[in-house]
Amino acid sequence: MQLESSERTSPMSEPTETALVRLEDVHLSFGQTQVLKGIDLTVNRGDAVSIIGPSGSGKSTILRCINALVQPQSGQITVGGTRVDQLTRETERIALRKRVGIVFQQYNLFPHLTVLDNIVLAPTRILGAERRATEVFARELLEKVRLSDKAKAYPGELSGGQQQRVAIARALAMKPELVLFDEVTSALDPETVGEVLWVIRDLIREGMTSILVTHEMRFAEEISDTVVFTENGRVVASGTPEQIFRGSDNSRIRQFVGGLSGGRSAARNGDALPDPMP
Ligand SMILES: Nc1ncnc2c1ncn2[C@@H]1O[C@H](COP(=O)(O)OP(=O)(O)OP(=O)(O)O)[C@@H](O)[C@H]1O
Ligand SMILES: [Mg+2]
């Protein structure tokens, strides 16, 4: 029996503990509409994976599955040992969401709370963390997102880019194992996009496991360990940034990447982009 189990662990198989997130043959429909048609995705601890692809291809739905905001009809989703597709109770889903941060295009800060209180709210209310220690941590996070001077400001007094950085700090305040970013710069004025990308870049360099849906092609190319191209509910290609952005022989990918790279994304996020917040 011993022999049999060691045979099963072929040298080619990945050690399971390095994969923090794994989707296997995930199918999801909304009513009659098939949205995910067999998604496979592996994200190792400490890696950054970008999901790119045309509108409606299922990118946001993949993130929502990982965070148990929607449940697939079939397939397996594992996050750090938890079978997300098998969670049946809302309490279990809430427990998962404490471990998986998500940042959306719309930052949805509480307008009547200061920046500091926005960050402190969830850890103290949901995790029951002690207020004073949480405030100290929140100030560290504000430093990380380069907003130390805005602790007492209200969201309405901040630019879109600053508010989005607060939203990132708010997600980090829960000390997540993983952060999902869904087009977090798409709604921003062009001049504030760079400062948000810088913050995300720093996080990834520090080893935060991240899955990003983005249209910022240069950024995805620079920071990703793996880039996944989705189309029509399927992963059409997955590989290194080099393979996807430079070496793909798939005409759809070339067309997609070429179309966006020539657009304003590239202009805003060029290789020579200086740090906007030195
Ligand atoms: N709650 C829902 N009910 C019905 N259909 C939905 C729902 N959410 C998403 N869809 C459909 O699922 C498909 C995939 O949507 P999804 O938001 O995942 O795409 P996307 O790749 O993130 O697109 P975009 O780039 O525009 O954000 C779309 O056709 C969308 O209309
Ligand atoms: Mg989307």
Image (cartoon, helix red, strand yellow):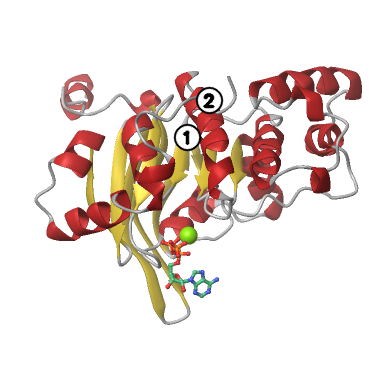
Q: List x then y, in percent, for residue 235.
A: 27, 54
Q: Of label 1 and label 2, which has the lower sequence position? A: 2
Q: Quadrant of residue 34?
A: bottom left
Lateral position of residue 78 relative to residue 105, left or right: left
Q: Secondary structure at mark 1?
A: strand
Question: Which amino acid does the dot numbered 2 rest on?
Answer: Leu
How many marks the image carries: the answer is: 2
Which residue is drawn at the image coordinates 85% and 31% (left, top)?
128
Lateral position of residue 2 relative to residue 223, left or right: left
Which residue is drawn at the image coordinates 25% and 36% (left, top)?
241
Kindly tell me whether residue 216 is visible in this rendering. Answer: no
Q: List x then y, in percent, for residue 275.
A: 51, 25
Q: Are marks 1 and 2 in contact (CB under 8 Å)?
A: yes
Lateral position of residue 111 relative to residue 109, left or right: right
Q: In front: 77, or 164? A: 164
Which residue is drawn at the image coordinates 86% and 36% (left, top)?
153
Residue sitting farthest toward the bottom = 32
Which residue is drawn at the image coordinates 26% and 27% (left, top)?
14
Indicate whether 189 appears above or below 81: below
Question: Which amino acid does the dot numbered 1 rest on?
Answer: Ser
* Disc 1 residue crowd, few under 14, some 14–19, many 20+, Cα 10 Å: many
Residue that mark 2 sits on: 203
Residue that mark 1 sits on: 210
Image quadrant in which the N terminus is located: top left
Q: In front: 79, or 209? A: 209
* Disc 2 residue crowd, few under 14, some 14–19, many 20+, Cα 10 Å: some
